[in-house]
Structure formats: structure tokens, C-alpha cells
Image: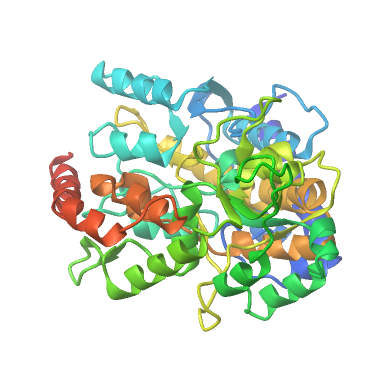
């Protein structure tokens, strides 16, 4: 097939897909009513706008070149489709997205993946140090990935790539706001990256066990919609739930708990309270505000709520006898009523759970809070960037932006409406909750860079794993400030 014919087929396919999505959206009230935001499961562009966007790109012809994507990829942290359609809407939507992009630009997309994010990071460093143009696009974690590569000078400033339309809806604006340092941005995120949809947190609850205790799922959903789903409400629901099921006189993994969570959820709770660990001064420079009065008040309350017998921290428990992490098996095996957990774990391990479960956003700190906020998980490989040695950044930008746009308009709606909402959400109200979860994804600079280990100290204290946060913070505050200042200096000298 000639290249012009391939482009015509690609354009026709895009329009057909989008007309189908728009039609489906009109039939689904909770989808049709939502606003268009990155991470919003209902953010569908109409077919006419889509065809205009694609038509503007149809004159690009990259002569059959290979577009190489280096990525971190595992089954529970997916970043690439299979080499053919396999009957799974998640992977098949991504597969079709890639074929459309290939036809539009006359390119061949190739993925080079590794399950080890450290190995991916090393490949980037070796490639740049050797001055090789081996990879066009990088998809990996922001923590233990981009947080090292960016200040190390291994990446390309995305703000200097005109063909990347970073201010558009198909890019996560919170990432753009948080990760611009000294006017430079080396990482973005959004549905161009498959793992982006796995990069959230939410609360799950066992509907059957809740009903046995007089808690209706409808009352929880209504509380969310009415803005009354708060940390105090969660605390009241788990109070007194603990039961020593094996009668050995001590709390262990064979007992029943009101809530399970691990240390990383401490950062999610903090973000859910509408807080960030840094704020920009009038010159746009980030400053640490972890020890602000508001921050300490919130953290102290979290710590007091989660140090009761009704809560179990799973961070150091390891795996159960079947080999499944206690981070998911406690809830799956009816050992906890609520679980604050990663979306990736829920999506990977709960699809075959026998009991019905519901999904809720991370609770607000108080009712007066404007919105529910969902922390972007920095340990998911959903950061997007270009290596410094890329020879044609504008070409890479064109292709990447098209992948982002099509990810937003074709992959994300399919994944959220079919994969997440059908395979994970067991009822219609949970589907509405997912829309709320993905509507307000928020990125935190220190959760990614962990200045002076302060992000770790914060999350451990928030979930009750440690005590006396303020005294610990005072000991490391100078080191944290120096680490932040060093980052500013590193960004200054990058050319």
C-alpha cells in the first residue's frame, strides 16, 4: 500500500473510532457529563476535531524509519502492546493506536523493554555517554528514573520541542506545572504512556463485609458525591473492626482489620488532603513546606488515626504462603474491610476476586476541601521523555504528540470504560468513582525527588509506621534544603 493510501486508511480509522466513542459516550450519562481533562475517563474529542488534528499531520513522511521506544514494562506495569491483537481491550487499543501512528508517518514503531527500571536507567546513561542516537522515546519511572536522569543531563528539554503540544488536554498538566524547574522540563506524562492509567491510588472496600456491618455501598458513594467522604468518615467506619480470628492474643496476618495500607499510601493520603510538599516562591523556585503548620496538623492526625489495632501496615509483611503480596492478599482473602492501594495492584490481582468490591477516591481531609485529589504514583513507569542525544527532536515530538493525542481520544476511553470499569468496577457507582479518581491526578515534586529522604519520612509517619515526625524532619531539614538547591544548580548548568 502506498504511503498516501496508508494515511487515508489511518485517518478514516481514527474518525471511525472516535465516532464510535462519541456515540458510546452519549449513551452513558456519567461519561457524557464529565469535563475534558487528562486522566478523565470521559474526555472524548469529537470526530471533527480529531480529523482536523490528524489531517494537519498527514503531510509528514519519515520514510519508513524505525521509531524506537525504550521502556520499563511488566505485566502489572504495562507499557507496550503485544505484536498482534489478543482480545484484551487494553492491549488491543494500544496496538491499534500504534498502527495508526505508523501509517500516518510512514514509520515502524519498535519497543525495547526491560522489567528492571535500573537497567533502563543504565541504558540511557550508557547511550548518552556514548553519544549514540539509539532511542527516540523513553518511558520509565519518575522516581528512581527521571529524577536521576534529568539533573544528570541525560535528557532533552521538552519545553524546547515545539511539536510537543504540552499545554493540550492529552498531557497531564499537574506534571507540567510541578516538573518545570528553572524553565526546563525533562519529563511529562499522560495517556501516551499505557502505564499512566495504572498510576493512581484509590480506596477499595468489600461490599459484602461492609453490608454485614450495616454499611451500604450506596451510602459510601453518596458520601463521595456529596463531598463528605473524609478521613474522619473512614476512621469512624474502621473503628472497632479488628478481630483476633485465630485467638492467639496478638495481631497478625490471620486476623481481620478495618483497613490495610502500606507506607507509600502515606504520600497518597497527604496529596488527598490537598497538600504538596513544595510551593513556588514569587520567582517560581520550589521551596519545601513540609513543616508548615497545616502540614504538621494533617500529618499528626493521620498518624493518630492509623496507629490503632484496626489498621495493619503491610510494608514489611512480604508475601503470603501462596506467594501473593500481603499488600493485596489481605483484602482479597477477606482479612480487611477497606484497603488503600495502588491502582496497578487492584487491576492486576483483583479481577478474579469472588466477593464484590467497590472503589472510592482517596478521602478528603475535611469536607470544606474543594476536590478529591489522586496522587500520581512515581513508581509506575509512566514518565515520558527524550534522550539528550536524539538527533531530530521535532520529529520525535510530532510522533509522540500524536501517540499522546490518540492515547487520549481512543485508548484511554476504551480502557476506562471497558477495562477498568468492567473488569475492576463491579457496579455502576464504582464507575462514577473512577471518573472522580482520574479527574484530579496530582504530581508532587518531592515525592519524585525525595529531598533528604523527607518524602519517605513523611509517608512512614502518615500511616503510623514511625513517630515524632517533626523532630526527625528538623534533623534532616538542612540536608533536604541542600538537595533541593543542588537540583536547582544542576538544572542551571544543563545545556
Q: In which quarter of the image is residue 169?
A: bottom right
Task: Tell me if residue 318 comes above or below residue 198 in the rendering.
Answer: above
Q: Percent x, y for residue 170?
A: 55, 54
Q: How many labels does the image show?
A: 0
Residue at (65, 64) in percent of width and height: 238
Task: Tell me if residue 255 comes above or below residue 40 in the rendering.
Answer: above
Residue 362 placement, left or right of 378:
right
For the question of whether residue 296 can be seen, the reply is: yes
Residue 381 placement, left or right of 494:
right
State the quadrant of the N terminus.
top right
Q: How is the image coloured?
A: rainbow
Residue at (71, 44) in percent of width and height: 247
Q: Along the line of sight, which residue is nearer the eye, 182 or 475?
A: 475
Q: Along the line of sight, which residue is nearer the eye, 98 or 453?
A: 453
State the quadrant of the C terminus.
top left
Q: Percent x, y for residue 242?
A: 67, 56
Q: In which quarter of the image is residue 270?
A: bottom left
Q: Percent x, y for residue 192?
A: 56, 43
Residue at (15, 48) in percent of width and height: 479
For the question of whether residue 275 can be seen, the reply is: no
Residue 282 placement, left or right of 382:
left
Residue at (44, 37) in percent of width and height: 141
Q: Percent x, y for residue 220?
A: 73, 71
Q: Along the line of sight, which residue is nearer the eye, 106 or 26?
A: 26
Task: Tell me if residue 148 comes above or below residue 110 in the rendering.
Answer: below
Name, please, the residue furthest toward the bottom: 368
Amino acid at each position: 500500500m502506498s504511503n498516501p493510501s496508508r494515511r487515508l486508511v489511518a485517518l478514516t480509522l481514527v474518525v471511525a473510532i472516535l465516532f464510535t466513542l462519541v456515540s458510546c459516550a452519549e449513551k452513558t450519562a456519567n461519561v457524557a457529563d464529565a469535563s475534558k481533562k487528562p486522566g478523565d475517563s470521559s474526555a472524548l474529542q469529537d470526530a471533527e476535531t480529531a480529523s482536523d488534528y490528524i489531517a494537519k499531520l498527514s503531510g509528514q513522511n519519515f520514510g519508513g524509519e524505525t521509531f524506537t521506544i525504550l521502556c520499563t514494562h511488566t505485566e502489572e506495569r504495562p507499557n507496550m502492546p503485544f505484536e498482534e491483537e489478543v482480545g484484551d481491550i487494553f492491549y488491543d487499543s494500544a496496538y491499534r493506536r500504534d498502527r495508526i501512528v505508523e501509517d500516518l508517518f510512514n514509520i515502524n514503531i519498535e519497543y525495547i523493554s526491560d522489567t528492571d527500571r535500573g537497567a533502563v536507567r543504565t541504558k540511557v546513561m550508557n547511550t548518552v555517554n556514548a553519544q549514540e542516537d539509539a532511542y527516540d522515546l523513553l518511558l520509565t519511572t519518575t522516581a528512581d528514573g527521571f529524577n536521576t536522569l534529568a539533573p544528570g543531563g541525560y535528557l532533552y528539554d521538552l519545553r524546547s520541542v515545539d511539536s510537543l503540544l504540552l499545554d493540550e488536554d492529552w498531557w497531564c498538566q499537574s506534571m507540567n506545572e510541578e516538573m518545570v524547574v528553572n524553565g526546563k522540563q525533562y519529563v511529562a506524562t499522560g495517556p501516551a504512556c499505557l502505564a499512566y492509567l495504572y498510576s493512581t491510588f484509590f480506596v477499595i472496600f468489600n461490599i459484602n463485609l461492609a453490608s454485614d456491618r450495616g454499611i451500604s455501598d450506596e451510602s459510601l458513594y453518596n458520601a463521595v458525591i456529596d463531598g463528605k467522604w473524609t478521613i474522619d468518615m473512614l476512621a469512624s467506619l474502621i473503628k472497632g473492626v479488628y478481630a483476633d480470628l485465630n485467638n492467639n492474643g496478638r495481631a497478625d496476618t490471620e486476623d481481620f482489620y478495618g483497613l490495610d495500607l502500606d507506607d507509600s499510601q502515606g504520600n497518597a493520603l497527604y496529596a488527598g488532603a490537598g497538600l504538596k510538599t513544595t510551593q513556588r516562591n514569587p520567582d517560581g523556585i520550589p521551596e519545601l513546606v513540609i513543616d508548615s503548620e497545616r502540614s504538621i496538623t494533617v500529618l499528626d492526625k493521620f498518624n493518630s488515626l492509623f496507629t490503632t489495632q484496626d489498621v495493619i501496615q503491610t510494608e514489611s509483611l512480604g508475601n503470603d504462603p501462596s506467594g501473593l503480596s500481603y499488600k493485596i492478599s489481605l483484602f482479597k482473602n477477606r482479612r480487611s474491610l477497606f484497603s488503600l492501594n495502588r491502582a496497578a495492584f487492584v487491576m492486576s490481582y483483583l479481577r478474579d476476586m469472588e466477593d464484590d468490591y467497590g472503589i472510592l477516591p482517596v478521602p478528603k481531609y475535611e469536607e470544606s476541601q474543594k476536590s478529591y485529589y489522586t496522587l500520581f504514583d512515581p513508581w509506575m513507569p509512566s514518565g515520558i521523555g527524550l534522550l539528550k542525544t536524539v538527533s531530530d527532536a521535532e520529529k520525535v515530538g510530532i510522533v509522540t504528540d500524536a501517540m499522546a493525542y490518540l492515547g487520549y481520544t481512543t485508548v484511554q476511553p476504551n480502557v476506562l470504560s471497558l477495562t477498568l470499569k468492567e473488569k475492576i468496577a463491579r457496579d455502576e457507582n464504582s464507575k462514577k468513582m473512577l471518573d472522580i479518581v482520574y479527574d484530579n491526578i496530582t504530581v508532587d515534586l518531592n515525592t519524585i525527588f525525595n529531598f533528604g529522604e523527607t518524602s519517605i519520612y513523611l509517608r512512614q509517619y502518615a500511616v503510623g509506621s514511625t513517630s515524632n515526625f517533626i523532630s526527625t524532619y528538623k534533623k534532616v531539614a538542612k540536608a533536604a534544603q541542600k538537595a533541593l538547591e543542588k537540583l536547582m544548580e544542576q538544572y542551571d548548568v544543563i545545556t
